[in-house]
Image (cartoon, rainbow, N blue to C red):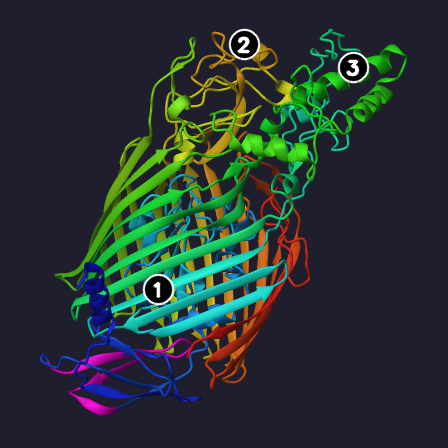
Amino acid sequence: MTLLSRALLLAVVLAAPLATAQNVSGIVTASDFGPVPGANIIVDGTFVGDATDVDGRFALEVDFSDGPRVLRVSYTGYETQRVTVAGPTSDLEVVLEPQVLQGGDVVVSASRQEETILEAPVTIERVGAAQLARMPSTEIVASMDRLKGVDVSRSSMLISSISTRGFNSAKAERVIQLVDGVDFMDPVLSLYAGNLTGVPEIDIEGVEIVYGANSALYGANAFNGVVQFQTLSPFLHTGPSVQVRGGERGMYEFQGRFAQKVSDRFAYKVVGSYFEADDFIASNFSTLTTIADNFEPDGSVRSPLDPRGADLVNRYGEAVALTPATVIDANGTTLGQLGLEGAVFTPGFTESDLVLTDYRARSARLAATASYLVTDAVKATLALRTGNGNGIYQSSNRYAFDGIGGSTAALTLEGEAWTTRAYVIDSDQGDTYDLGFLGSFMNLQPYVNADGVADPAGRNYATVYGQTYAGAFAQARLTGASIEDAYAAAAAATAGIFPTVGEDRFATARDATLASTTPGQSPRFESDGQIYHADAQYRFDLPGEVNAAVGGSVRLTRLESNGTLYSDGPNSPLLDPAAGTRSVRDGIENDEYGGYLQLQRAFLDDALKISAVGRVDGFRNFDARFSPRVSGVYAFGPGRQNAIRASFSQAFRQPAQLDQFIYLDVGRLLLVGNTAEGFETASLVPATFGQPGDRIDPLRLERMNSVEVGYKGILGGKLFADVSYYRSIYDDFIGTRRFLGREAGGTPNPAEFFGAPAPGTPGFANRTRAIQTWLNADQTVTSQGIQVGLEYALDPALVLAGNYAWADIEEVDDLILGFNTPEHKFNIGASGQVTRALGYGANLRWVDDYMFEMPFAEGLIESHVSLDAQATYALPDFGVTVLVGGTNLTNSQNLTAYGAAVNERIIYAGLRYTP
């Protein structure tokens, strides 16, 4: 027998279900519908369990050697039942009661242990599988903005980021996102690209969102919240599941899941998904207010229609071809200013041009999990996950993700009171490119005219444009034309110089630019990164009825970009600023580690619960810090269905890897990290240009003290309310600033900004230029807010929900805070299960207008309303559910990031198969 034959035989044996003795069996029914298929039955204190079949029946092996056991029976949308079983039985019957309000939901993320949502000491929201099934969406992260106090920034259709309590951005660097306790942040870009490398929605059992400061339990990056995706167990949810959808914008989607319980000890699952649609393409042609050359001498902003051109938000590559001091005609003759005022820009290219007009958002994900019960109470799980796709991301520029993705391998060993976990994340940037760089570097491609004839002098597009403009402008002025008429003549003379999409010369210039691998001349990232992480937690009891938990984690991040994104390779830090020589840094490593202790005790017959957590974290580039959280919850009223809570938290945030190590030259602006010696500055503002500014010190950890008080409860058996107020005080707040300065320090010389040393000459590398870096604010920054969530259940067929959030921040002069949050917003929704077959969900969201600030662009996002709805109809005899829905049904101007695309309407229909 060959080795391959033996391997196949072994696979068949392992895949075959093993016969086991099952001494407890019965049926689960619902008081309103009859037998319940897919209900979970778990033996308390173990991982032993089963799920009911289509007739609601179950069977499992229970060890009664230590006496009676408790079975925990649960099903989404129903109250969990705990049933004591004295011994073997074959006729156990469990009846579940509907639970239309979320007060009885069990959560684990608030305290890293199970507790009801009423007992949680901080604000937490949970969305279960039944709610997700009725929730209209094309991408799960984008749909989270229906929850109270949650904001989602969408760079494009699939690239979304989530935030709570302000400071929304496309990177969501103050919120961590986990799948079953495993992070899935991209280590290179310090971001979560929506759910692009997360878990397919068909495998999600629920989503928990913990609001505000959570550093005490989750480390320094859980600054403004934690999002935890929980997946379905292969032991409990077996068999195949499939979902297919199609819709507007050429959307089609497939998701599939297969799980098998091979034996009472071993189970596995395989999950996959594929999504594709025409992406949203940004088309904001307003003038950028972050570019000094866009301002007139009187401080006004240049019009987008100015004949001299302008640097516009969603046009890329508008390079300065002429300034008043460089009016040179095609023969190289200096013509003088001749009345020319302000810079002249090349026209650049639109986002649609650069992504070839038919850019498709795409997501492909695959995950495999194997779980083995070492004993009834000890489980080992190996989870492998990979994903990649396309989308457009916004940060310091707009970036076209082309095959970006990542892979995760995680090994978890857990018992009833302890968990150990280790995982590695490996990122893959694919063929991602920077749209701004692509447009800029296309300016430098050899000029070819519309007839396909190359320039005999070998000039590039930018040079031809500038010299043609100068010649036409000068000729008009020398023949007596006014300045305005000379501008118009120059604009007419340069029409058609640059290629347009569809022309062969456009494709040639674009392809040649993308093919370049020379750092500083290529729009592509050659970046690679890994995260190596391990964590553990152990829960135990102390004298005096104190419940305790101790845990810790360690993480190593490795980055390598060959100078295309970080200060490594040819863009390593300068050793000799005058000579321009640099150190040789093949990659960047950064590590952090920490540990925590949590103590909890109940008083007043368990009505009052006090909790205290303390965590110490250490960092390679910063001093160690202590993060405490003290909280209390008091339950009262009939059935203790009302609770008031209060907490104080102190949190620290380590600057993102990009904040520390970025090196990105976007032409007229250098983005550079700030962990070295800091910067001397001069003003970049037109009215005070060149005036000396204050010194910027190297980055420190950001600190926050936060207080929260709240009420949660069920009123009258039908109304669930969650109301909270928070106030957060930030010290050493991390923001960004633009200024005149030198990369390696030293006093800036404003005159060099217009006439810098030539490339390759002494002083060029450390010349005075426009720089943007990350820094800590000297002032204290204070934010506060109120969040109100209400849910009223008339009956299972009609559940009304609404939430309102007020958010406020004190502005700080000369610092880009990036609060990016409307002062007022609300959601109004309705959902329900009309019959066992028919369900629905609808939501209307309104947001106030607000300023949105990112390194790429700053501007006003106007108030808007968005309406989403979905209906489902089940055909139980076939195991099929039909679904029809849509997002932004009124096709409003639903914009969530200034400079990004409007999130347009998508209507879809599909089928969900679960036998």
Q: Is residue 448 above or below residue 381?
A: above
Q: Nearer the viewer, residue 764 or 70?
A: 764
From the top left corner, tell me how far across and down residue 474 is, in percent: 81, 13
Residue where numbered disc 3 is placed: 471
Residue 270: image tag = 1
> Taking the image as drawn, is residue 641 in sight?
no
Q: Is residue 71 magenta?
A: yes
Residue where numbered disc 2 is placed: 757
What residue range appears in magenta?
67-91
Q: Dot 2: what SS?
A: loop
Discs 2/3, front:
3
Q: Quadrant of residue 870?
A: bottom right
Q: CA distance from mark 2 to mark 3?
A: 26 Å
Q: Is residue 19 magenta?
A: no
Report whether 111 appears left or right of 791: left
Q: Dot 1: what SS?
A: strand
From the top left corner, tell me how far across and down residue 179 is, in percent: 36, 57
At a point 21% along the width and 86% down the height, the residue shown is 24
Q: CA distance from mark 3 to mark 1?
A: 66 Å
Q: CA distance from mark 2 to mark 1?
A: 59 Å
Q: Earlier in the sequence, mark 2 or mark 1?
A: 1
